[in-house]
Image: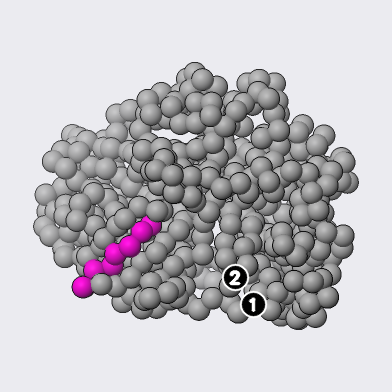
């Protein structure tokens, strides 16, 4: 497509429409559409802070969340200290079991099967607000011995690989914060910063917000160590300036698309759409590449079209922003492509696999697998597909079952048929390795101590399984409990390795 055929006016209208949805008295965000030299359309709405009321602008600083992965990979892949085929255990000798054999490449391309540290901590009853430090968290990961799945056999998102590679570089005297400063921030004149905790002061950082059960805005906070999986901060303008360098293949962005966007493969040779901190997606005939980020109260996304040298970016300080959908809307307007249709062919319902902890819920065109959801879109020949490279789904309704692939693995789910497992699993369950436990009392799963103790309703899934309907702040936490005699496996999509034993 020639540059003159790009629909900049339509992109500007789409940007204005998005920004208008963020009211003047609410948290907001900013969007931009750009080429390799300038921002061609920009719009902002809402405020930086409900306490101050300053309007959100292109210079408002936010947490980029997992967009950090893209920047970290861009810097880490240029280092001689590590190679993509290096086993993590060679770089971090404290790693145990199957985790030690995972290579750097699989740790970064989401095929490593590494349990997500945050979700694993959550399964042990540690709330997001509890303070955790870098070394404590790394030591915790090094005590894990099992993978969610054999490395290379599936693709499933996890923050842990980036945390481990970050830790390996730091042990070799290479700090992510210094790399960002020296290789990107100073050469490009951008305000990227690398706080390690929520409490680290960052000049101009806008608070993040989420809505409580009563509909009132709440101030977002977290005690978790952020690591190179999601710590970076900056503004909309900073993010665009970096992406312009990447698109133009100049300066600090030289070679980034080629290195990070190169096709990665499963162990059997099948290609995946997730590279190394970059994810490929389709918009009609076009191949777009980008990455998103989500931390409590913050949403970010950028999409690039290398063919036309254009891109779109979204940043926001409110939890309800659907950043990927907004970035896709901007690029669709710019390129004159139709947005994909929602896929609603699969009946709403709760489904489970024949055995193991795998379950699926379909509701209003969103499929939730092991508690993580993706919007389904209409594919070919009756298939419903996700647009996510790190959470690919291809599903259809056939013969009273949902069948297809999730994470490039063949799966089949049947409607849930409850059994009597709840009557057989009452009492205490313990995880001695981590001094954790929970109680099943009646139809509830109770976990925690004192005023922090929570009670989650339990829903039968059949096949000796229960579904605990809990919450982590504003986020649902839907835990599958898969029982096998006196042992129960607790599973979320990003953490499937913890086992508890019947206790006294």
The quadrant of the rendering that contains the C terminus is: top left
Residue 62 is at least partly visible in this image: yes
Residue 331 placed where, x, y %? Answer: 68, 70
Residue plotted at (72% across, 40% down): 194
Disc 1 marks which residue? 337
Mark 2 residue crowding within 10 angstroms, few (<14) / some (14–19) / many (20+): few
Q: Is residue 324 above or below residue 355?
A: below
Residue plotted at (76% across, 38% down): 180
Residue plotted at (16% across, 55% down): 463
Disc 2 marks which residue? 285
Quick one: 350 or 425, which is closer to the camera? Answer: 350
Q: Label 2: state its secondary structure.
A: loop
Quick one: 394 or 59, which is closer to the camera? Answer: 394
Marks 2 and 1: CB-CB under 8 Å? yes
Residue 198 is at least partly visible in this image: no
Quick one: 199 or 373, which is closer to the camera? Answer: 373
The quadrant of the rendering that contains the N terminus is: bottom right
Q: Is residue 343 above or below residue 190?
A: below
Residue 121 placed where, x, y %? Answer: 43, 40
Q: Is residue 54 above or below residue 119?
A: below
Magenta segment, prevailing SS (helix, strand or loop): strand
> On the picture, is 255 further left or further right than 426?
right
The image's mark for residue 423 is none
Task: Please report whichever mark, 2 or 1, sits nearer to the chain's N-terminal start.
Answer: 2
Q: Is residue 301 above or below residue 501?
A: below
Residue plotted at (69% across, 41% down): 74
CA separation, marks 2 and 1?
9 Å
Q: Label 1: state its secondary structure.
A: loop
Q: Which residues are magenta?
A: 399-406
Q: Is residue 457 magenta?
A: no
Mark 1 residue crowding within 10 angstroms, few (<14) / some (14–19) / many (20+): some
């Amino acid at each position: 497509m020639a540059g003159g055929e790009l629909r900049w006016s339509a992109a500007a209208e789409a940007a204005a429409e998005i920004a208008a949805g963020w009211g003047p008295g609410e948290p907001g965000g900013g969007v931009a559409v750009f080429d390799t030299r300038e921002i061609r359309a920009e719009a902002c709405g809402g405020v930086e802070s409900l306490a101050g009321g300053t309007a959100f602008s292109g210079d408002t600083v936010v947490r980029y969340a997992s967009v950090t992965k893209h920047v970290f990979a861009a810097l880490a892949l240029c280092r001689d200290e590590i190679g993509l085929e290096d086993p993590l255990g060679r770089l971090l000798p404290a790693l145990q079991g199957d985790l030690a054999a995972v290579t750097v490449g699989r740790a970064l391309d989401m095929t490593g099967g590494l349990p997500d540290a945050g979700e694993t901590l959550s399964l042990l009853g540690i709330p997001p607000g509890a303070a955790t430090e870098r070394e404590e968290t790394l030591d915790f990961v090094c005590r894990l011995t099992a993978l969610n799945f054999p490395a290379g056999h599936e693709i499933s998102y996890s923050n842990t690989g980036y945390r481990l590679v970050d830790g390996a570089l730091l042990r070799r005297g290479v700090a992510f914060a210094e790399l960002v400063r020296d290789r990107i921030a100073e050469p490009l004149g951008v305000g990227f910063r690398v706080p390690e905790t929520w409490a680290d002061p960052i000049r101009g950082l806008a608070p993040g917000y989420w809505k409580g059960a009563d509909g009132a805005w709440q101030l977002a906070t977290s005690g978790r160590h952020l690591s190179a999986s999601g710590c970076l901060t900056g503004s909309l303008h900073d993010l665009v300036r970096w992406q312009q360098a990447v698109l133009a293949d100049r300066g600090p962005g030289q070679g980034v698309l080629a290195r990070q966007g190169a096709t990665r493969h499963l162990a059997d040779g099948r290609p995946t759409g997730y590279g190394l901190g970059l994810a490929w997606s389709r918009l009609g005939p076009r191949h777009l590449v980008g990455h998103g980020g989500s931390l409590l109260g913050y949403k970010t996304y950028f999409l690039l079209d290398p063919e036309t040298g254009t891109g779109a970016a979204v940043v926001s300080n409110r939890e309800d922003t659907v950043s990927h959908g907004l970035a896709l809307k901007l690029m669709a307007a710019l390129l004159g492509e139709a947005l994909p249709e929602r896929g609603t062919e699969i009946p709403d319902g709760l489904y489970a696999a024949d055995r193991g902890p795998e379950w699926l819920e379909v509701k209003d065109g969103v499929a939730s697998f092991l508690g993580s959801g993706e919007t389904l879109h209409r594919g070919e020949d009756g298939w419903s597909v996700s647009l996510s490279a790190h959470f690919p789904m291809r599903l259809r309704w056939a013969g009273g079952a949902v069948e297809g692939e999730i994470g490039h693995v063949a799966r089949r789910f049947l409607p849930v048929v409850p059994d009597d497992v709840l009557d057989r699993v009452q009492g205490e369950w313990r995880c001695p390795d981590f001094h954790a436990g929970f109680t099943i009392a009646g139809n509830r799963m109770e976990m925690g101590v004192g005023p922090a103790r929570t009670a989650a309703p339990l829903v039968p899934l059949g096949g000796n399984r229960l579904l605990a309907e809990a919450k982590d702040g504003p986020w649902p936490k839907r835990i599958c409990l898969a029982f096998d005699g006196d042992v129960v496996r607790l599973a979320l999509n990003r953490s499937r390795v913890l086992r508890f034993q019947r206790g006294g």
